[in-house]
Image (tube, helix red, strand yellow):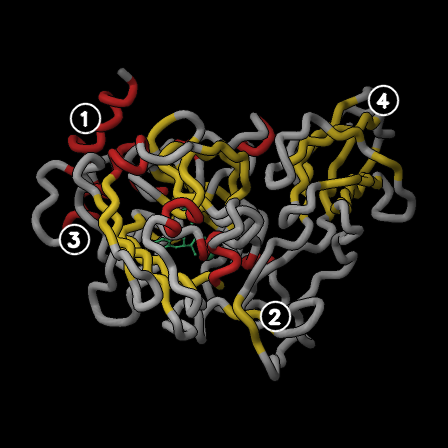
Amino acid sequence: MRHTTNRLRRKLLAGGAGALAGAGMTMLSRSVLAQTSTIELPIANGRRVVERFPEKRPMIVLTTRPPQLETPFEVFNDSVLTPNDAFFVRYHNNGLPPSIDGDKHVIKIGGNAVAKPYELTMAELRSAFKPVELVAVNQCSGNSRGFFNPRVTGGQLANGAMGNARWVGVPLKDVLARAEPKNSAREVTFNGLDIALFGGGDFVKALQMNHAMDGEVMLAYQMNGADIPMLNGYPVKLIVPGYYGTYWVKHLSEIEVVEQPFEGFWMKPAYRVPDNDCACVEPGTTPSATRPIGRFNVRSFITSVADGGRLRAGQQTVVRGIAFDGGQGVREVAYSTDGGQSWRGAMLGADLGRYSFREFTFGFTPEKGSHDLRVRAWNRSGQSQPMEALWQPAGYMRNVVESVKVTAI
Ligand SMILES: Nc1nc2c(c(=O)[nH]1)N[C@H]1C(S)=C(S)[C@@H](COP(=O)(O)O)O[C@H]1N2
Ligand SMILES: [Mo]
């Protein structure tokens, strides 16, 4: 029932959008302007418009064409899974399809390194393979870019370009196996329905063959028990657990298994990081060598109180937050209430799997005055977060131990 309703709704939203993809998106984003308000972000970005897009609650707007929407940070305190209507949205190009018929959608599987190219319908994807389920974080490479100092160009995001969802779909490995990859297969490329309207590069990403065949990379058609929202990749998106969102191709429509390395614009020069252990360079300098961005580093955030927030003096509060990493799983979260001078262990919440947000809590009874709260996580292989922010020119991979200054009154 819900399924049907969803589909109807999606058609309604897209209805009358016109033949041009770009015009279609204008209609989509303009259809619900009534809810506009603004928000002050605690960074140099200043005021931001908060607006409601199709299937979304009011979100922080970076751009409207294409839609780039950030999750209001309070959402991360409500639940460990990020609701679909609050999940961030990132696109590169303007040519979004004005509407998608989920029942007619097909994924073409081919390339010069398969013996049997074929077309996979959504119906077959849902019925001919054994579905799997996984809770995993999607995070944009540029999440938190707006905090870089010295500042860098690109979307000036605060910390809301991330989200955690329960995905249901089919392992990519099974879908590829049916095309009978040859021994010469080296990489797999992924393309979605959106196009670059004004030239520039269509958004295509690639994974190494062994990564694509690891059994974890997934073609998901469900997000938190519902169809994937249009703006998050309806009807099917690639899930690359532990890897930055750039690989999570939305409206997936073409998969190619190829013998030669793929170096399209969005693999090179875009989405590269300094090729060293910290993926960082001296502020203001250019890396001498780069590699494609890969797994998430370790991060943790206090969610129950914001920087500049107030607490009650003399009263115990439970401070809450989330931590995650690139797939080892969170082993430990430490907290400090004195700006990092002394640390104690926080309590970890339910384990939803090693790719999920992990909740943590600690009790704090503040004395009257100001306090500098910090949290720092470790993953199961002992990796953690730097105390001082690292820098790189693209503004990717920020994971410094953040400081949340609160006043107890
Ligand atoms: N088809 C398509 N898929 C895409 C992109 C895009 O521009 N087009 N952007 C990628 C990037 S950089 C990110 S961070 C994620 C964001 O996923 P979301 O919009 O569902 O949150 O989508 C990825 N998949
Ligand atoms: Mo991204």
Callout 1 crowding tier (Cα within 10 Å): few <14, some 14–19, many ≥20 = few
Can you tell which mark lies on residue 8? 1
As drawn, 267 above or below 245? below
Residue 341 horizontal side relative to residue 52, left or right:
right
Mark 2 to mark 1 CA distance (whole Å) = 45 Å
Which image quarter is the C terminus in? top right
Mark 4 vs mark 1: which is more N-terminal?
Answer: 1
Look at label 2 and name its amino acid.
Gln
Callout 3 crowding tier (Cα within 10 Å): few <14, some 14–19, many ≥20 = some
In terms of depth relative to the viewer, which is nearer, 40 or 334? 334
Query: What secondary structure is marked by label 4?
Result: loop
Residue 339 horizontal side relative to residue 277, left or right:
right
As drawn, 47 above or below 149? above
Mark 2 vs mark 1: which is more N-terminal?
Answer: 1
Residue 403 at x, y = what percent? 73, 47
Residues at badges 4 and 2 in contact (C-beta under 8 Å)? no
Q: Report if residue 149 is visible in the image.
A: yes
Look at label 1 and name its amino acid.
Leu
Mark 3 to mark 1 CA distance (whole Å) = 20 Å
Mark 4 to mark 1 CA distance (whole Å) = 53 Å
Can you tell which mark lies on residue 392? 2
Depth check, mark 4 against mark 1: the one in front is 1
Query: What secondary structure is marked by label 2?
Result: loop
Q: Which residue is mark 4?
A: 314
Callout 2 crowding tier (Cα within 10 Å): few <14, some 14–19, many ≥20 = many
Residue 303 at x, y = what percent? 64, 34
Q: Which residue is mark 3?
A: 21
**Quick check: is the Cβ at mark 4 less than 8 Å away from ligand 1?**
no
Depth check, mark 4 against mark 2: the one in front is 2
- Which residue shows up at 79% across the image and 39% down it? 332
